Image (spheres, rainbow, N blue to C red):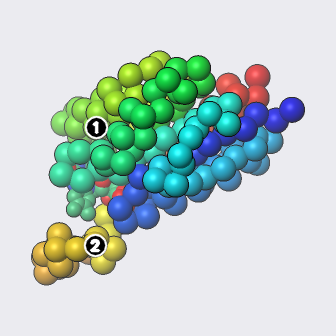
Amino acid sequence: MAKTVLVTYASQTEATAEVAEFIGKTLEDQGLLVMVKPVTQVPDASPFEAVVVGSGVQMEHTYREAQQFLKRSRSVLAHKPLGLFITCASLSKDTPEARAKAENYMAQLTGAAGVPVVDQTAFAGRMDMARVKGLMGMLMRKSDVQAEDWRDWEAIRQWALGLARQWNA
Ligand SMILES: Cc1cc2nc3c(=O)[nH]c(=O)nc-3n(C[C@H](O)[C@H](O)[C@H](O)COP(=O)(O)O)c2cc1C
């Protein structure tokens, strides 16, 4: 029987949501049974055999909903293989400082999970002011910064294939 996988995410401007969908599609292509949904729409992860959780980053923090999901699912996730990913702007540059920042963001998620993680990774994301909501969006749109998309779909695919290899074994 194919393993059931939940790919769930917290996303403010859809960059992480699109990565989650892509990971879900890649896992599905490898024969896994996948559901992709925002963390706010997943009351319970227990029906799934493996779980992937993703989050974007704003103001040096992974999103509260992702952390809350991980905290409230701890007892369930302790018994399942768990993969974690983030998307962030820091990794648009490949410098020691950028990697240290990404590690710090990842640590926020692993800390919230508090259970062993089979695989964790940080991807460069997308910065699109036009999609930022609320007052922050209004302020950022004034600054005339162009949208930039640094997502490396092949790197994302390879990460998902690695998970599929483990979960199909
Ligand atoms: C208001 C705002 C603040 C951000 N702050 C950070 C940050 O502190 N560090 C970082 O690496 N990326 C930061 N980013 C970039 C986002 O993490 C990146 O664009 C990510 O892919 C967005 O994911 P999402 O659309 O799923 O929310 C910020 C983006 C916005 C719009």
Looking at the image, residue 72 sits to the left or right of residue 26; the answer is left
Give the residue displayed 61% in from the left and 52% down from the top.
Answer: 36
**Residue 153: in sight, yes or no?**
no
Camera-side residue: 130 or 77?
77
Q: Quadrant of ligand 1?
A: bottom left
Mark 1 Cα-neighbour bin, 10 Å: few <14, some 14–19, many ≥20: many
Query: Is label 1 in a helix, a strand or a loop?
Result: helix
The kind of residue tagged 2 is: Lys
Q: Check disc 1 and report the residue beneath it.
A: 105
Q: Earlier in the sequence, mark 1 or mark 2?
A: 1
Residue highlighted by disc 2: 133
In the shown orientation, is residue 16 left or right of residue 153? left
> Taking 96 as reference, is 78 above or below it?
above
**Vertical order, 39 against 132 (above or below):** above
Q: Residue at x 56, y 54 (%)?
A: 37
The three-letter amino acid code for the residue at tag 1 is Tyr
